[in-house]
Amino acid sequence: MTKSNNRCDVESCFLCKFCLNDWMPAIASQKINYTIKKGEAVFKEGEPVAGIYFVYSGSVKVHKRWDTEKELILRFAKRGDILGHMGLGADSHYPVSATAIEPTVVCYVDMDFFRSSLNVNSPLAYNLITFLTDELKESEHRMRNLAHMPVKGRVAQALLTLNKQFGINANGAINVELSRQDLASFTGTAYETLFRMLVELTEEKAIHVNGKSIFIVDEQKLHIHTGETI
Amino acid sequence: MTKSNNRCDVESCFLCKFCLNDWMPAIASQKINYTIKKGEAVFKEGEPVAGIYFVYSGSVKVHKRWDTEKELILRFAKRGDILGHMGLGADSHYPVSATAIEPTVVCYVDMDFFRSSLNVNSPLAYNLITFLTDELKESEHRMRNLAHMPVKGRVAQALLTLNKQFGINANGAINVELSRQDLASFTGTAYETLFRMLVELTEEKAIHVNGKSIFIVDEQKLHIHTGETI
DNA sequence: CGTATCTTTGAGTCATGTCAAAAACGGTGG
DNA sequence: CCACCGTTTTTGACATGACTCAAAGATACG
């Protein structure tokens, strides 16, 4: 995790939207950039909260461990996304870990400073409220799916989510390099089970797998398993 | 759902904290009270968002359905708690239902009005941010548990949560009247499975069941199943 | 006192996790 | 270029936790 002072300017980042305005130069001056290697942590579960991060480039997985050997990946963050906002709550320890899944640059703002910015900048606060609400919605949605949706549907759901979040690359494959283990953790299932499901979905011609690349061939067939209308 | 205009004054409600101040009489004037019968809905999944609710008395379950026959109870709300804050997000439809589990009075504020209050009242916005963050934390915690924790542990966890939220009554039992079906839905399991787990926990002398009442006898033994240090 | 609802128990099935091992792959150094 | 080693993928067999279905008690209710 190496430090630098590049300014960042991300159209989709709601902090940037504010800190680039003339009337909020204070935030910009507080920003620090960190470069993070693949597999390296931005912060770890249980650590005291230092600040809040915004992804400038690369991608990060946000995960929570269970029983030393198992983990659940809660979400992914890419350019423009926030990390560490859970540090805003009552407890001053991160309840999750954030680990880069490819070389990543994040922009860091001290939590006290961010907190006071919220108090003087209501559009920023309002944007954060909308963001948190949508996160909560998504989280409760996935919670219900974990409770009631069979694994195959959850795999389908995970692929659709990744497709939406990362888009497709030049070849038409979902544009993330994600290990099978991580895909399993994101689905909330065992490695081998995930594997079998990918084979089944391939046989149904819903997806096509080539090495690490995954292509969504027929979105409708995935939706059948999620049991959700689009 | 019958309408009235009682003023409410709930120490633990963060809206009340603001709307009782002289400088925020506007909110108070906008509040409407609704009386809701047991089993009646405050709002239903899929309905267009009208406003935000605060529980004045009684208790409400917040739940999300799956497949017509199954549901997951996400949380409970009692005196002072918010309902319908998910309406603050991008989509203008409630993603969950809220149903009274006992006779309840809620206080209603129109969403547009609440939104504009947030813009002019930064302490209110800041409080909401803290609240949403803690909700999100809790939600992701339960998400991980649903993915990895066995049912017995989740039952234990559910009982500990209920104990914490509702406290105990004069007899020492957890102070909610909750159907077994609802307890199962809160745990994210089938009715019969929940039942067997309650029997097992009773045999282990971790809890004691008497009719609908549940007593926590040995909190430590419950914690063993949740696998979490206190 | 009959009907409906909820509780309790039993038995069977199935999905999913676990374990183990073979096969394929990728890199490294001689 | 090849032999070697570590890692990831792939497959098979198995164990079991949890859900389903069904039916018998119990309790509430009108």
Image (cartoon, coloured by chain):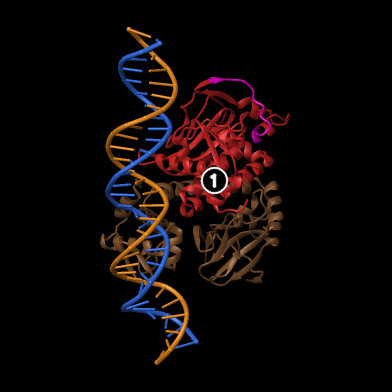
Chain colours: A red, B brown, C orange, D blue
Of residues A214 and B211, which is closer to you in this image?
Answer: A214
Prevailing secondary structure of the magenta residues: loop
Could you tell me if residue B98 is visible in this image?
A: yes
Please indicate whether residue B185 sits to the left or right of residue B100 in the image. left
Residue at left offset 58%, top offset 67%: B41
- Residue extending farthest to the right is A22
Q: Judge the density around disc 1: few (<14), some (14-19), many (≥20) Cα neighbours within 10 Å.
A: many
- Which percent across, then down, holds residue A228? 58, 53
Please indicate whether residue D26 sits to the left or right of residue A153 in the image. left
Of residues B58 and A169, which is closer to you in this image?
Answer: A169
Residue type at numbered disc 1: Gln
- Which percent across, then down, holds residue B108? 64, 62
Dot 1 falls on which chain?
A: A
Residue position marked by numbered label 1 in the rendering: A157
Q: Count the marks.
A: 1
Is B39 located above or below residue B97 in the figure?
A: below
SS state under label 1? helix
User: Which residues are the magenta region?
Assistant: A3-15
Of residues A51 and B147, which is closer to you in this image?
Answer: B147
A7 within the magenta span: yes
Residue at left offset 49%, top offset 25%: A38
Is B97 located above or below residue A101 in the figure?
A: below
Of residues A142 and B37, which is closer to you in this image?
Answer: A142
Residue at left offset 63%, top offset 68%: B34
Determine the image quadrant of residue A208. Answer: top right
- Which percent across, then down, holds residue C16? 40, 48
- Which percent across, then down, holds residue A161? 57, 42
Determine the image quadrant of residue B173. Answer: bottom left
B36 within the magenta span: no
Could you tell me if residue A91 is visible in this image?
A: no
